[in-house]
Amino acid sequence: MPDPSAPADPTVLHPMPGQPRVVLLKPLITSALIEVGEFTYYDDPDDATAFETRNVLYHYGPEKLIIGKFCALATGVEFVMNGANHRMDGPSTFPFPTMGGSWSQHFDLLTDLPNRGDTVVGNDVWFGRGSTVLPGVRIGHGAIIAAGAVVTGDVPDYGIVGGNPARLIRTRFDEESIARLLTVAWWDWPIEHITEHVRRIMSGSIADLEAAVPVRECHSPQPGDE
């Protein structure tokens, strides 16, 4: 039986007993082009374990999908990667070379498609059901993506966005508070320290979090130190 006093385990695929619809993504991902931080989870009643193939679309490389720690992804969240792009500068957008046969000799027509680079998601981001993130988007720490949103551009730290295309509705805190939260960066605390201060992290004030920042150990200079 798990020790109820021990911190949660970031290596367990199904963190919620009796709920196979919820998976931690870090122990699930196999692609070298996808990076996910600890405790980020995906919830899907159909097959949450198929996230890598069902929810990360057109990922033919070389761009990466990078998702931080402690993110919550509701059912149907999708990341559209650069491989979805088609040529738009000619009469047709149809990708003839991908269909094979003699058409494949024209594959050079697909090598200079727009590439917006990596898609990067910060820590502690909440994605609503059925939201979609387009290629090359940067989503800041603490952001909230509304259900059904189509994110076509960058989202600021602690921003709330919604709609198609997604627009900034508001930020969760003022600029000074956001700067303080980014300095605290609770998601980088040791897991034991996070465990000790879960209540402050979920419902405390920013001052409470600042008071809980772990003290970094240091040592006195020793002979030979440089």
Image: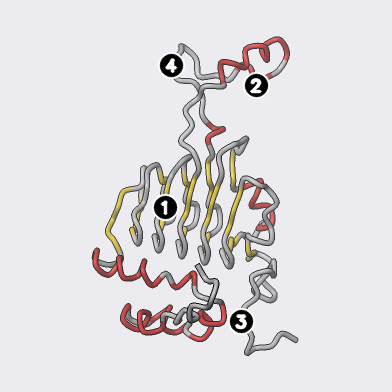
Question: Which structural element holds mark 2?
Answer: helix
Question: Which structural element holds mark 1?
Answer: strand
According to the image, what is the colour scheme of the structure? secondary structure
Say the numbered circle drawn on residue 89: 4
Query: Who is closer to the viewer here, 213 or 209?
Result: 213
Indicate whether 207 appears above or below 47: below
Residue placed under numbered mark 2 in the picture: 98
Residue extending farthest to the right is 1
- Point out the tag, 4 or 2, that comes first from the N-terminus: 4
Q: Distance of mark 1 from mark 4, alpha carbons?
A: 29 Å
Say the numbered circle drawn on residue 139: 1
- Point out the tag, 2 or 3, that comes first from the N-terminus: 3
The amino acid type of the residue labelled 2 equals Thr
- Point out the tag, 4 or 3, that comes first from the N-terminus: 3
Residue placed under numbered mark 3 in the picture: 7
Q: Distance of mark 2 from mark 1, alpha carbons?
A: 31 Å
Question: Which structural element holds mark 4?
Answer: loop
